[in-house]
Image (cartoon, rainbow, N blue to C red):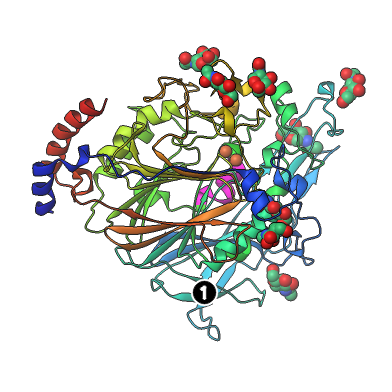
Amino acid sequence: MAVAVEVFLLVAACTLAATIAQPTTVRFADVSKMYNSSQPEAYAGFAELMYPLTGVAAAQPPANPEAPQQVLVTYQAPDEVMITWFTGKPQTTSGSAGAKVPGAEGRGENVVSYGSSRGSLKKQATASTDYYTQDYNISPALNISGISDAQYNYTSGLMHCARLRNLKPNTRYYYTLGTNRTVRSFKTAPSVSRFPFKLGHLADIAISVNSTETIRKLGLEEPDLVLLNGDFAYANIFDFNGALGYSAILTKGVLFSQQSRWDTLGRILEPLVSRVPTLASQGNHEMELQLDGSMFKSWLTRYGSNLPYAKSRGTPFYYSANVGPMHLVVLSPYVDFVTGTPQYDWLVRDLSSVDRAVTPWVVAMWHAPWYHTLVSHFKELECHRLAVEPLLYKYGVNIALHGHVHAYERSAKVYNYLPDGCGTTYITAGNSGVGLNTEFADSASLTRFSRASSYDNSTNCTRPLTTSALLVYVAGGKICNTTDPVSGKYCPNSQPTWSAYREAAHGFVTLDFESPTRAVLKYFRNLAADRQPIETVPITRDLSCPNQARKSRAMERQMRAVHSSVHSESL
Ligand SMILES: *[C@@H]1O[C@H](CO)[C@@H](O)[C@H](O)[C@H]1NC(C)=O
Ligand SMILES: *[C@@H]1O[C@H](CO)[C@@H](O)[C@H](O)[C@H]1NC(C)=O
Ligand SMILES: *[C@@H]1O[C@H](CO)[C@@H](O)[C@H](O)[C@H]1NC(C)=O
Ligand SMILES: *[C@@H]1O[C@H](CO)[C@@H](O)[C@H](O)[C@H]1NC(C)=O
Ligand SMILES: *[C@@H]1O[C@H](CO)[C@@H](O)[C@H](O)[C@H]1NC(C)=O
Ligand SMILES: *[C@@H]1O[C@H](CO)[C@@H](O)[C@H](O)[C@H]1NC(C)=O
Ligand SMILES: *[C@@H]1O[C@H](CO)[C@@H](O)[C@H](O)[C@H]1NC(C)=O
Ligand SMILES: *[C@@H]1O[C@H](CO)[C@@H](O)[C@H](O)[C@H]1NC(C)=O
Ligand SMILES: [Fe+2]
Ligand SMILES: [Fe+2]
């Protein structure tokens, strides 16, 4: 580490811009043509309206309501996972006072039997149980088409949660749930610090044949850990008849959320997430505001409460975990984040205590991206970026992973919109299965103008966001309209140099961490052959960057001094 300091003091490598390759854009039209897809260039709404999972057995509830379903493995530590599953029929009620407790199916089956050989599941872990309700009270006076019933409340099935402790790292375990004899298996993650380590990422999943294809293809890559980065079932924009009902929310402020979608999503994820440990974040579609003012209730019950947030003194919304050679920091733009808030203070404490000798790689994930060039959600999170980006730079976060924008985009190493060899690589991959975003923010020639109102024709630039804070729900509710440092406008004139590759197609990414200085990003497109990445890109950790050094107080002081000078140079 001393070597790195000396090199740095001599060369100040951090001020050198990264070598920038020619930016690449692959439009949806090109992808469709390549694969002779019958799909129109773009479509309004959701892929699943076009490519629904109707009749697909894996999406249906099991015939026996006592059979375990929606099995999910959540990473806790290299020697510990949480296994959750549901039994029983979820209940919806209308017309009269409804169910508030789960049905009796599945009770008394509260145990996971497991072992490292299929024939000997001698260990047992007892589960606790949980469930939740979601209540709505929709006035008939609102006259919302598709919602004929005034009230429509949901009580979930019974969720079982079992902690399996003292596991061996990097080891396959076999398990059965309750009295059901189906043997499943998962592999524990490698020990902390160990290479190689393969990370998979899903975001904006939804329920279409495109989602199940993404889930299947990611499974073929056999990741050690899968991140579920927000926007799960889109329950909040479907009404009780399963129709897309966003406009009712927008125009009438109505609360409703088709909860059965969460159950269906749990079933289509199961083939992957019952085999591979996961960690999750929440997206805007998980807000699901309730009559009592609560939010994120389904996500918190099903995913958030099982996360290992207590270990990092975080919350389900922001927490960190060491997995293999990676320190993962999960953030939330949906919980207050500016200086002086608990999330900000937590982040400073967390990042400043990372030991790069233990976890050389620091990866951040949160749902909505800063660095992307699609019209959809363009610069939506500028207030968040302005508050948090200096911290990510100071502490040398290597890679940030996002969804929210339904496309794939990879940045060069960047800081404050300028290519920077010591900056972060931002990856947006919210293209797991929901309808794609296909319009780029910067160029008339790339734009179909399907939403002409999004554009200012006098500048060929997408208009600054005016989206209501309730819908975007960036905590604090502010929209910051910053200008592009190159064009001086809200959007750049062409694909900016910090945007290395962007593509409107369904797919996913994996990251192979190979050594303390080299990771490899692979982007897979659903319409391409299995196991054939469209791009394979090394991401390096440059040890001459002061923000990559193992932390010490002396180092911190040096970095602070030098960063302020680097900062003023580049601005
Ligand atoms: C698409 O159609 C063209 C022309 O018929 C053919 O050459 C090409 O192989 C097809 N591509 C795929 C992926 O089927
Ligand atoms: C056991 O679980 C599997 C998978 O959930 C299900 O297909 C099967 O029907 C269950 N068996 C019984 C006896 O319930
Ligand atoms: C739904 O829940 C709300 C709030 O708890 C309650 O007022 C309403 O009566 C419930 N409706 C039914 C059908 O249970
Ligand atoms: C209710 O909405 C329907 C269309 O969705 C409309 O035809 C009807 O006139 C509306 N009724 C009232 C009372 O507004
Ligand atoms: C979604 O899946 C359908 C059916 O397989 C396919 O025709 C379509 O091209 C897919 N869309 C994308 C963007 O991959
Ligand atoms: C902007 O230009 C596009 C393409 O020429 C056109 O379709 C659209 O109507 C224009 N919008 C406005 C608001 O003038
Ligand atoms: C906007 O783009 C159109 C179409 O490419 C072009 O004709 C026009 O000159 C551009 N306007 C500006 C201000 O760049
Ligand atoms: C952002 O721009 C929009 C559209 O020009 C404007 O309505 C809004 O007030 C601006 N917001 C801020 C915080 O400047
Ligand atoms: Fe989102
Ligand atoms: Fe989304």
| Left or right of 355 on screen, residue 70 | right
Q: Quadrant of residue 269?
A: bottom right
Residue toward you, 495 or 417:
495
Where's residue 394, x and y in %?
25, 38
Secondary structure at numbered mark 1: strand
Is residue 459 among what the camera can see? no
Of the 4 image quadrants, the one containing the C terminus is top left
Q: Is the stretch drawn in magenta largely helix, strand or loop?
A: helix
Residue drawn 47% across the image and 80% down it: 116
For the point 50% across and 68% down, the residue is 222
| Magenta span includes 302 | yes
Report if residue 320 is visible in the image. yes
Identified at 73% across, 44% down, the residue is: 40
As drawn, 323 above or below 414: below
The amino acid sitting under disc 1 is Gln
Determine which residue is flagged by label 1. 124
Total label count? 1
Circle 1: is it few (<14), some (14-19), or many (20+) Cα within 10 Å?
some
Q: Is residue 470 magenta?
A: no
Where residue 374 sits: x, y (%)? 54, 35
Q: Quadrant of the N terminus?
A: bottom left
The residue nearer to you, when weighing 368 against 4, is 4
CB of mark 1 near ligand 2 (< 8 Å): no
Q: Nearer the viewer, residue 473 or 349?
A: 473
> Farthest residue in the bottom direction?
119
Q: Residue 166: horizontal and vertical position, in percent? A: 39, 71
Magenta stretch in the rendered image: 296-305
Query: Residue 24: x and y, percent?
Result: 48, 44
